[in-house]
Amino acid sequence: MPKSFYITTPIYYVNASPHIGHAYTTIVADVLVRYHRMIGEKTFFVTGTDEHGDKIAEAAQKAGITPQEYADKISAQFRNLWPKLAITNDYFIRTTDANHIETVRYILQKVYDSGDIYFGSYEGHYCVGCERFYMEKELVEGKCPDHQTKPEYRKESNYFFRMSKYQDWLINHIKNNPDFIRPERYKNEALAFLRDPLDDLCISRPKTRLEWGITLPFDENYVTYVWFDALINYVTALDYPDGKKFKTFWPAAEHLIAKDILKPHGIYWPTMLKAAGIEPFQHLNVHGYWNSDQSKMSKSLGNIVRPLDLKDKYGLDAFRYFLLRDMVFGLDSNFSEEAFVQRLNSDLANDLGNLVSRTITMAIKYCDGKVPRVSRKDKNQSLHEAALKTVTEVEASFSDMSLHKALIAIWDFINIINKYIVENEPWTLGKDPANKEKLTAIMYDLLLALRAIAVLLMPFMPQTAQKILRQIGAEESQDFNLISIKKDDALKAGSPLVRGESLFPRIVQEKENHVQEKKTSMIDLKPEIDYEEFAKVDLRVAKILAAEPVPKSNKLIKLKVDIGEERTIVAGIGKDYTPEELIGRKILIVANLKPVKLMGVESYGMLLATDADKGLTVLTFDREAKTGGKVR
Ligand SMILES: [Zn+2]
């Protein structure tokens, strides 16, 4: 029997259109479910919308439409967004669905019959925005701390769920299952709520003031409080109580939420389940907020954009990558276009994109455009071992919800592959036919490593993974899972290699400062200088990101380098180096030389080189130097 995996997002309240927070939660759920599918588990993924309550009724009234029409409109925005983010949910639930209404009424009746729902009266400060009563001590200067508005004083008779009865049970359950709520900070927060006596939960609203809700099965003058209604979606979606899905998936339930709804999910929901005789869920996984300061966003790019627009501007996979890589699960993170573009350029364009394109280019050149046949004895195990280590790290990251760590592990592997290329210099081996076997084995190892990268990236960046697989001639195979990475012959000899478009074109940020055009001249004779004069020269470690010949010149090469910021420099080394072998190297440049134009190309700096036996040799480093590091 395969293991099961059930993942839910919160059902999103239809009082607002989708934003970055909704997108993040849903993408995380999607990455998780794609991963669990890939490792062969039976999976079920549910998202949807929460549509009842005061706020919806009010918003609909303002818009001059019925609550149902209003809910239909906003719910559709969510439903239509998910395919654009490559979300692969199995089910989209709405709390206005007939099967959900039936399930809510079934559970209410069950809990009522067992004596855990009673009728009582309540008076207090009621915030319409929060849809709940506040205790005097919870108010800040008499106002709701969330809405900064003065609550209404209300007195009404209502139905209450005996939540207090389950306080001790819940404390013990959380203590006995330390990752029931994770990361740990949120477990502690839930336990802190539970230090004070738990009040019973008011679960009804009189129809005299709210009709937009599910009518209580035992009193038709009342509708159900929106949280008691909404949380039940997680079991409605599995056809509780008798559905086969409920038996299969409920024991493996993973809820995913943002920290603002910890209390309903960490306190109300487990006690509701307990009272209804349903086993608790497995884990409540809680993440932080994306802070996006719109005023700070994208000044340098000249326009202000909403985070979700960046998906269209830079591509879905880059968007998914940024969200997953830049947020430590559980903590808050800042969303900015600058940070997005930086990740795109450094991790995606440089590290991954360059690796794929140069490997494919070399493999086509040295292996006649096909996956080569290699005998086992020729294979170098170092890359394969690095792949296996990465698989282990990725598995561990998924089991403890630290997806950014999975990506860090994958990028460590990408860097190992890049280093393998630099160390083995296929372009040098390629000059002598005697090296054919060795070169072929190296190319096979590289292609196999690309396959492993594609498989590992599949849950995160499904489109990119497919593009890589197509380029290495592995698209047709169906064997895309972690186990396949463990085979060192996963690529079929003879499959055609395909040179594709650049996976992630670099984003060029507009620079505000203009180029001052002034020729500088080299001086042959150098008089003595003092230290202050020397210190004016800003020497930096530069990593070569891209290299190409300058058109119509027989020795100039245009280099794109990283010195902490990006530069173009033009160097006269085209007779001594091919562009291919320069990429990825770290060199030494003069960074504060005034720009010059060489054969029509602006050069913002100069690399250092010296005479070799034949031609020139570029100055490099004895040990791994830090990109952008100052040289003194
Ligand atoms: Zn409020």
Image (tube, rainbow, N blue to C red):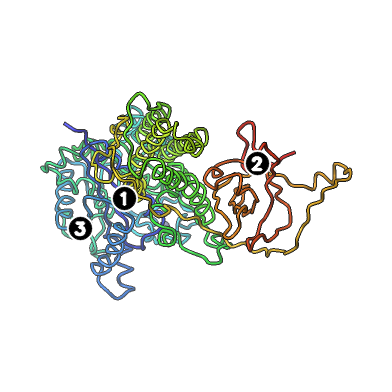
Res 195 visible:
no
Q: Residue at coordinates 53% horizontally, 51% vertically from top-left?
A: 342
**As drawn, is 218 to the left or to the right of 537?**
left
Q: Earlier in the sequence, mark 1 or mark 2?
A: 1
Looking at the rendered image, the quarter that the N terminus falls into is: top left
Q: How far separated are the C-alphas under marks 1 and 3? A: 19 Å
Q: Earlier in the sequence, mark 1 or mark 3?
A: 1
- Disc nearest the viewer among 1 and 3: 1
**Which quadrant would residue 81 be assigned to in this image?**
bottom left
| Label 3 CB-ligand 1 distance < 8 A | no
Choose between 209 and 3: the one closer to the eye.
3
- Disc nearest the viewer among 3 and 2: 2
- In which quadrant of this rendering is ligand 1 seen? bottom left
Q: Say what amino acid the circle numbered 2 marks.
A: Val
Query: Can you tell which mark lies on residue 376?
Result: none
Choose between 358 and 30: the one closer to the eye.
358
Q: Which residue is mark 3?
A: 214
Q: Which residue is mark 2?
A: 618
**Which quadrant would residue 448 be assigned to in this image?**
top left
Q: How far separated are the C-alphas under marks 1 and 2? A: 56 Å
- At label 3, counting other C-alpha atoms closer than 10 Å, the crowd grade (few under 14, some 14-19, many 20 or more) is many
Q: For the residue labelled by badge 3, is the local secondary structure a helix, a strand or a loop?
A: loop
**In this view, which residue lies farthest toward the front?**
433
